[in-house]
Image (tube, rainbow, N blue to C red):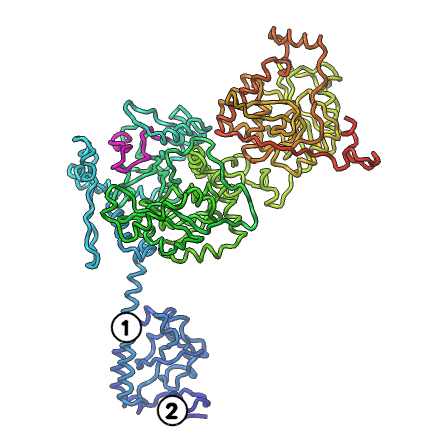
Amino acid sequence: MRLSPDQAGEESSGHDPSSEPQVFPLNSDSKSQNAELWIESWHVFTSLQPFLHHFLVPPFSFYSPSSTLYPLSLLPPPSLLLCPLSASHTSPFLPSFLPSPLTVIPPSYLLPPSFHHLLLFLTPAAHMQAKKRYLLVSVGAGLLFLVYLWALQVGEFQQQPYRYRQFPQYPQYRQERQYYHQSQDVYQPQPLPQRTPSRPPRHWPESTELLEPYLEGGEQEEDSPQLHHQHTSPRERRAIRDNIYKNKRCRMETCFDFARCQSGFRIYIYPPQRGDEISETYQKILSSIEESRFHTTDPSRACLFILAVDTLDRDQLSAQYVQNVRSRIQNLPTWNDGRNHIIFNLYSGTWPDYTEDLGFEVGQAMLAKASADVVNFRPNFDISIPLFSKDHPLKGGGIGYLTLNDAPPSRKYQLVFKGKRYLTGIGSETRNALYHIHNEEDIILLTTCKHGKDWEKHKDSRCDRDNEDYSKFDYQELLHNSSFCLVPRGRRLGSFRFLEALQAACIPVILSNGWELPFSEVIDWRKAAIIGDERLLLQVPSIIRSVGRDRILGLRQQTQFLWDAYFSSVAKIVLTTLEIIQDRVDSHISRNRLLWNSLPGGLYILPQYSTDPAQYPFYYAMLGKSPSQQFTAVIHTVTPLQSQISPVVKLIIAVAKSKFCAQIVVLWNCDKPLPPRNKWPSTSVPLSVIEGQTKTMSSRFFPHDIIVTDAVLSLDEDSVLSTNEVDFAFIVWQSFPERIVGYPARSHYWDSSRSHWGYTSKWTNDYSMVLTGAAFYHRYYHYLFTHYIASSLLTMVDRMANCEDILMNFLVSAVTKQPPIKVTQKKQYKETMMTQTHVSHVNSTFLSGKGSKASRWADPDHFAQRQTCMNAFSHWLGFMPLVHSQMRLDPVLFRDQVSILRKKYRDIERL
């Protein structure tokens, strides 16, 4: 049905919703009658057209069945009308040149979001009353103008730097950050940013003003940026400013010389200069590097350089602040603007703002810094380290305090904190608000105002009560009896509370916005901590109460792993820092996050061995894998092959009969030449003989490429094992591939009268070592023994020709934190004692220095040397890793009163 224009107008206004509108071309009369109106509307439309095309994205278009698009800019000048949004709109009044019917496709979105339910609808003005159309045009233009103003405000907010939008509720903190970034160009100080009238400007004293009572006359002039600025030309200042801008954006690809690391990852420490004062903490850092496998005394071989100047404390008011650092490092021959250097720092800046100013130009040096700010932190270049006290141990460190994995994990308190409450200055906002969530029941948050000499001048009404409650609770008791520990920021972003909570198995609840967490490049802190927001302090109680018991147990266990693996000592913190840098240098063989965040930790995983976690013995269960079903027997030989009845020949024959044996490798460490091939027994498995160039005791654990199986059976040449014993021990090892499994057991003890560790071979009710003269272990321990243990210990083993088996037990127990496993009741694993004649011959040969090496078991000093080794190895590790065990594994039917035919390992009972 064709409708008249009047009917169509009624339908468009909603008088007849059941009828369907049609398109009518406008006749000439209507055009002439409304020409003036079209011209006027066209002017309004063209003035708003740029705005429409800017905000209506995708461009507002018309669609016709002929698949022709008509952009908004091509339409005749209509008046504007806002109509409710629907799937499609059909207009009965459109110019005649457009196809019919014509449908208006609403855009996918309009700006602002509050107008998503509106649609710009176009209709001719000829059939509307004059007052109504002018009113609609005015309203539409007004609304569009308001939308335009709103969009300008949104655009201005979105153009602000992201770091400022992170802390909208801290205007003072944001402005201080902005002032810090502007003040990084120390040679051209910038004025303080304009503050709003509601925030009056504050006077920040210059660093020279603060240090005047502490500095000598000539030191102020050298370290003062303002004075230095007076002697530089504009071109020099511009070059310095450009250099600082470039250094702030340093990455390994732009500010590190990889060519220096082609000969290996070696670290050189500059020799200290006369008069250098090094703090105890910095000396611990230097000692950790000197005793590591990375240290070198040749700077030409170094990949990384460490300053001998103490840079840990850069608080200008500190007694340990080192003066003239800039001139000292600039005079270093290989400084090169800091390239390939790493600088350690714990404290930066000073009162009142505690900015990250170190007092000298870092340049292109990497910064290992505590309390690192995400704004100034250079990702994949700098390293965030934890804040630790001067009492933090050099090696070993205290163990974690999680002694009971109770399920469900329940403690007396939910959340605790005990610390200082800063009355003024940075870091006071969060701590001053803790009383809001303190309930004196399961949430104990204690603060004291007693901080500094003039705290009483700034005390508030709560100070007396806070100080009284503060003394009612013991901090250690709270720490060890709470599930969560609050770790708010202090003057700086980091806090000692962080490491204290980790050690106590108290899950840290971190409230320190902008803190780059320690070693965040490799550690997944979501598995060990709750990371909160300072702005949402009041939501912390509900957040921690919503954490399930199973997750609490997992978080608590992860705190213990991280504490022991990376934070329990200064040496571990330093080595973790160096290992992260090595992963960057050798990025093609770097550790992944699985290796860093699961036992035994990244320090015991050497990626040069393999980048596949399935190649390590620690991840079989996690990955659903199992070790290989065969083993390689490695027989260490130091005496010549006399005949076919020699102990080594009988041992080869017995091992070769095992169905799990893949090959036998003989390490020929005898001084006499290799016997011909016909002197060796014929076996069903490959038999290889390796004669090392350096026939040392530690070479028995060298990772030879010929060993391809996961399991290694380590044997002394005079060991006595049957085929059944070999098979049973291998079956047991497959269930414990990360441990040493074998026969000869030994133990250690603490001699309180001499204050040292002792070694015993007596038969006792427990053991802590299984000697490698007849034992299975994973081949990865060969690589770890050779490349991880300090060269000084390997030299000691080679010099004494002793203790290599003890050192291997120390290493495996330190990695796994578990004892070895002894199988069967067998205690003697050596060949029957040699006859007196043969003993005399061996001793005479040993004394004369002729022939082969004498058996080390015949050396009277052998046992005394092993006592010495125990203490030397524990000193190197910083703790005693050996763990006692009372478990022994026997075959299931061992000595049971059943038929011998039903027993799988029959020969074991007869031995």
* Mark identifier at residue 146: 1
The answer to which of marks 1 and 2 sits earlier in the sequence is 2
Q: How many marks?
A: 2
**Residues in magenta, as a range:** 305-329
Mark 1 is surrounded, within 10 Å at the Cα level, by few (under 14), some (14 to 19) or many (20 or more) other residues, namely few
Quickly name the residue at label 2: 10
Inspect this view and state whether residue 327 appears. Answer: yes
Inspect this view and state whether residue 236 appears. Answer: no
Mark 2 is surrounded, within 10 Å at the Cα level, by few (under 14), some (14 to 19) or many (20 or more) other residues, namely few
The kind of secondary structure element at disc 1 is: helix
x, y percent for residue 459: 26, 49
- Secondary structure character of the magenta stretch overall: loop
Where 212 falls versus 786 (above or below)? below
* Amino acid type at image mark 1: Leu
Relative to 738, is 293 on the left or the right?
left
Quadrant (top left/top right/bottom left/bottom right) for the C terminus: top right
Q: Is 323 within the magenta?
A: yes
Return the residue nearer the eye: 848 or 545: 545
Return the residue nearer the eye: 48 or 139: 139
Relative to 330, is 417 on the left or the right?
right
* Mark identifier at residue 276: none
Q: CA distance from mark 1 to mark 2?
A: 31 Å
Q: Quadrant of residue 9?
A: bottom left
Where 789 falls versus 836 (above or below)? below
The kind of secondary structure element at disc 2 is: helix
